[in-house]
Image (tube, rainbow, N blue to C red):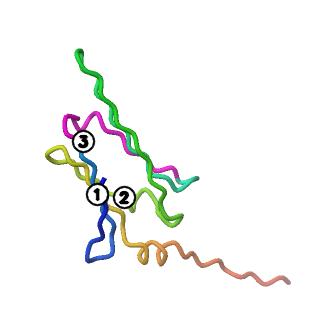
Amino acid sequence: MRRYGKEDGSTVLEYNLAGFDVKDIAIKVDTATSELMITAQNEDVSNRRSFTTSVTLSPYTTPEDVTTNYKNGVLQVTIAPLEKRKAESLVDIPVTESE
C-alpha cells in the first residue's frame, strides 16, 4: 500500500491489485466501527487469488467521503479532507422553550 496526501487535503490509498478484474473487488465502509474494508477474490480454474485489508478511518468519515478508481491494476481510494467532513458533520439542534 502507498499512502499520500493531496494538495486539497484529501488522502489517497493505493493498492497494487494487478491480475484482478474490477468485478473481483469489493469495498465497504463500516460506519459503526469507522473501518474501510477492501477484499479482492479471483477464483480462476487453475489459480485462486485473494487480497484483504482494512483501514481505520476518522469517525467523521461517511461512505460519501470515499471515492475509488481502478486502472492498470492499481486501486486508488481517495478520502475527502478531514476539515470538510468535520464542518459538514456539525448539525444544529434547535432549543425548545417549555411553557
| Residue 17's disc number | 3
> Mark 2 belongs to which amino acid?
Val
The residue drawn where x is 35% and y is 37% is: 51
Tag 3 or tag 2, which sits nearer the N-term?
3
Of circles 1 and 3, the one toward us is 1
Q: Which circle, 1 or 2, is nearer the viewer?
A: 1
Residue 12 placement: quadrant: bottom left
Position of 43 compared to 54: left or right?
A: left
Residue in the foreground of this view, choosing between 74 and 64 = 74
Between the C-alphas of marks 1 and 2, the distance is 16 Å
For the point 24% across and 46% down, the residue is 16
Q: Which residue is mark 1?
A: 2
Q: Earlier in the sequence, mark 1 or mark 2?
A: 1
Secondary structure of the residue carrying numbered label 2: strand
Can you name the residue that lies furthest to the right here? Answer: 99
The residues colored magenta run 18-30
Horizontal arrangement in the rendering, residue 68 relative to residue 57 (left or right): left
Q: Which residue is mark 2?
A: 66
Q: CA distance from mark 2 to mark 3?
A: 18 Å
